[in-house]
Amino acid sequence: MPLTTDGFFSLQPEIAYARKGYNRLSVPGISSEARLFLHYLNAPVLAKIKAGGMVVEAGPQVGYLQDVRDCNPTVDPSPANRPNRLAPYQRWELGYVAGIGYELANGLGLGVRYTGGFTRIRKESVMLPLTRSYNSAFQFQLTYLMTRR
C-alpha cells in the first residue's frame, strides 16, 4: 500500500507460515537429543522505504502458534499421545521484523530479515529453563512483485 506517490514509503501487510525451534538442545553442561518445532502463522505489518532498488523494512509482527512437535526421547518417547501438547506454550506471540533487500525493475527481489519475539515461548514455570526463551530467526528471501510501477 503506497503512502507516497513516488513509492518511496509504503506499508506492506503479510501473512506467512514459519517453523521455529531447535534440532538439538544445547545448554552448557547438558547434551540432549531433544527436538522442538513450533509452527506459526505470522502476520507482520511492515513500513517499507524504497530508494532506487534498495529496500529497508521494519515493523511489528503477530504470530499464532498452530502446532508443536516436541520430541524428547529421554522424557517422553511418544509426544503425539499427549492430549494437549500446546498447553505449556504461549499461543500468541508479539514480535518484530527488520530487513534489507534489493528489488529489480522486473519485480524480482532478494532480501534478508531478522525476526524476534517479545513474548516468551512457554508459559511461566519455575521448573522449566525454557520459560525465558524467545523466538528469533534470520530469513533469506527471493521475492517477485505481481504489480510493478
Image: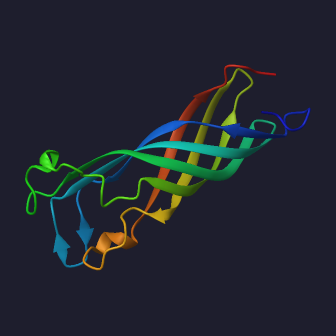
Q: Is residue 107 above or below residue 69?
A: above
Q: Is residue 63 above or below residue 33?
A: above
Point out residue 144 in the picture as x, y percentages from the top left corner: 62, 25
Give how far across and how far down residue 72 sits, in percent: 15, 58
Q: Quadrant of the C terminus?
A: top right
Instruction: State the residue at coordinates (69%, 47%).
Output: 57
Above or below, 21 against 101 in this view is: below
In this rendering, position of residue 142 left or right of residue 57 = left
Q: Residue at x 57, y 49 (%)?
A: 113
Point out the image quarter for the N terminus: top right
- Residue at the location (89% across, 37% down)? 4
Could you tell me which residue is drawn at 71 percent across and 28 percent down? 104
Q: Residue furthest right?
A: 5
Of 65 and 133, which appears nearest the observer? 65
Measuring from the top left, give residue 109's x and y in whole percent: 63, 31
Instruction: Please give left or right for residue 121 compared with residue 31 in the image.
Output: right
Which residue, as the protein is rendered here, is positioned at the far front? Answer: 83
The colour mode here is rainbow
Answer left or right for 116 relative to 133. Answer: right
Could you say which quadrant of the image residue 43 lies in? top right
Q: How many marks?
A: 0
**81 and 19: which is toward the camera:** 81
Of 92 and 57, nearer the camera is 92
In the shown orientation, is residue 94 left or right of residue 71? Answer: right
In the image, residue 67 lies at what x, y percent? 32, 44
